[in-house]
Amino acid sequence: MRIAGVMTGTSFDAIDVAICDIQPEGDRDAVSLFAFKSFPFQERTQELLRHVVHADMSLEQLSDLAFVLAREYAEAIRDIEREHSTSVEAVAIHGQTIWHHPPYSTWQIGSGPALSALLARTVVSDFRSADVALGGQGAPLVPIFDHATLCKPSTCRVALNIGGMANLTLLPPACSIETLQAFDTGPGNVWIDAGTRLTFGKHYDKDGAIARAGRIIAPMLAEMQSMPYFSVQPPKSTGRELFTLQEAQRLITKYSQPSSPLEDVVSTMTELTAWSIADHIHRYAPVTKEIIISGGGSQNSFLLERLEAQLIENQMPTKLVVHEHWQEKEAMAFAYLGFLTLSGRPGNVPSVTGATKMAVLGSVSSQHVL
Amino acid sequence: MRIAGVMTGTSFDAIDVAICDIQPEGDRDAVSLFAFKSFPFQERTQELLRHVVHADMSLEQLSDLAFVLAREYAEAIRDIEREHSTSVEAVAIHGQTIWHHPPYSTWQIGSGPALSALLARTVVSDFRSADVALGGQGAPLVPIFDHATLCKPSTCRVALNIGGMANLTLLPPACSIETLQAFDTGPGNVWIDAGTRLTFGKHYDKDGAIARAGRIIAPMLAEMQSMPYFSVQPPKSTGRELFTLQEAQRLITKYSQPSSPLEDVVSTMTELTAWSIADHIHRYAPVTKEIIISGGGSQNSFLLERLEAQLIENQMPTKLVVHEHWQEKEAMAFAYLGFLTLSGRPGNVPSVTGATKMAVLGSVSSQHVL
């Protein structure tokens, strides 16, 4: 099945489309990336999206937003299909998360039926609601994709995604879905970015160049390492509500000396990130041989060096591998989740989300006979 | 297929569940009602729903409402299944309309994926979005059900629903879906109810008893008959935004004499309703032999008498028949629309809604292999 996965993250900047070819092979599924493209949102849509998280919108604006997004997704699919002279069988959309509050509700906006009508194609949407209705966190949903694509018969691996937050999927040799473990280790890029913005006014520390030029502020690192989240047992998840810009500002003001270089702040944030990832891997997957890294943080070579150094300190000579599709992986995962739904197979992993049972996720709008 | 249709109308009072047995028979579909029950909304849900139309709600409240409704629907389905010792194959939910503004968007809230997970059953939801995305009004959707269940090979019929508004589906002998006509004739119960409330303080004129005791105020009737909506060519649709309580109040104040009986107001409103229905049938379906009447207005015997009298004035000796499922019909229609979607068949009628083409409506969440 050739299926497009459409992911729009919390930064509201772009629609990522990954066209994948997926087919069952024996007891696993083979997923290969056929094409990928990132489409910047229309200026007006981006404004609408920024508005929605800062202020309550009217019913009219929210209702229209679901259709505006469907129209933008339709344009993106048409564009990538034209560019690659192909036609997908189905489209799986994550939608834009505008509210996520398990166990009460979750809300990924973007109309599946409207998109299906516009494209005359099968659309799968609304992947998180079923898991939340079953008492789960509705997240993370990527682990089942990690399991399908990264699990090896005899190698202990970890899939690490370094986005705003950092999360792990533990992949012991030939692991079963039923016992899969996945959780957030804490900050990914969020505090490195915060430190860079608050000191150098830049959006992010490109390739870790700033951090590489600084030194670790030991008492600042120690205070951050003592945050309770790091010692909580998994499954656990966190977000920007715990690792805020305000808290980063407070720590920087407290520990940064006027005489000391500003780079030190970024070094210390990078060290915290590397330490928290390595510490969780050491505690929960000590025999890991390979870490497959995706997300924007995989492009920060200094962060990866520090992660490797931290693992070696823990007697873990682990190989770090940047995922060949480090940028495309999340959109690919939603193409795969769409494939599972269309195959009548569950997509959530109760040991990971906390749901009471597995469920076929999402909702299918189809212009074909089912 | 045994399928439950779940309808919640704009009065926010109850969840109507109609369990239907549906199967294709030759070139038509046979639909029979197996069970029906109306479940009053929980007090808290009703409050939420009333709130949503009067004031904008927060993202949290709206997100939660979609799940609260799913939980109430699940309870209703479990209850009716228990009572009748049956199990439905699928559930089709209309959801609660909280915004409807074609061609921009439409919004029926109530989570299909959550309901599917809670019941471990196939759920079809969100029936109006595809039609609106294709430039249609997203309404009415009942005509395809009227066509399937009421069309006769050699009799010219009209399906008349008298709810808040009154609408017609014209069913010439052996009519095809492609040329189907359906439209709103104007007020159904809305102004009879308004007149009754403003004069007698009652919710509605039971069986037309008040109107039966009054006389028509001729100049008031004439002013109402001159409203432009009545002379507009179909397809057309209207709502409470045109036939408001305020306008009813204005007319009553203008024409009601202190010396004349209050019943006259209700008589005149009833006459307007009967006249506008009869006039449209006379203009657009003059050879109609039978009118099959559903909705609350079908229980107002005085209204039906006046309708018959108006038709006779137009030389139409038409037979009026109250639909055997006058109350259950709309929920049954959504069971049928769900059946169409699950069969991969379109549910909208472009000649009725104005959409550019037919579409398989809605979105399917399934805990079975599709």
Image: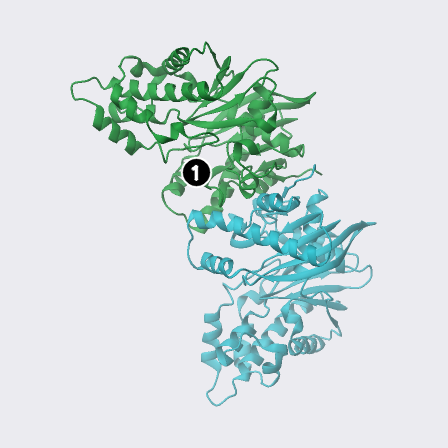
Chain colours: A cyan, B green
The quadrant in which the C terminus of chain B is found is top right
Q: Nearer the viewer, residue B234 or A109?
A: B234
Which residue is found at the position 41% from the left and 47% from the top? Answer: B57
Left or right side of B81 for A301: right
Is residue A180 visible to the viewer in this orientation of the structure?
no
Q: Image quadrant for the N terminus of chain B?
A: top right
Image location of residue B220, percent across then percent down: 26, 23
Instruction: Please provide percent x and percent y for residue B265.
Output: 26, 21
Q: Is residue A9 above or below residue B247?
A: below
Query: What residue is pinned by disc 1?
Result: B45
Q: Nearer the viewer, residue A77 or A256?
A: A77
| Most distant residue in the bottom direction | A259
Task: Identify whether B236 is placed above or below B295.
Answer: below
In the image, is residue A11 above or below residue B108? below
Name the chain under label 1.
Answer: B
How many numbered markers are drawn?
A: 1
Residue, x 56% and y 13% (percent of image)?
A: B155
Q: Residue at x 33, y 18 (%)?
A: B271
Residue B331, given in percent of the width and then of the height, sits at 53, 27
Q: Position of residue B289 (x, y in %)?
A: 51, 12
Quadrant in which residue B266 is drawn: top left
Does B123 sit left or right of B138 as displayed?
A: right
**In front: A270, or A115?**
A115
Question: Does any portion of residue B238 appear in the rendered image?
Answer: yes
How many neighbours does mark 1 have within 10 angstroms: few (below 14), some (14-19), or many (20 or more)? some
Secondary structure of the residue carrying numbered label 1? helix
What amino acid is found at the position of numbered circle 1 in the picture?
Thr
Q: Nearer the viewer, residue B111 or B25?
A: B25
Residue sticking out furthest to the left? B259
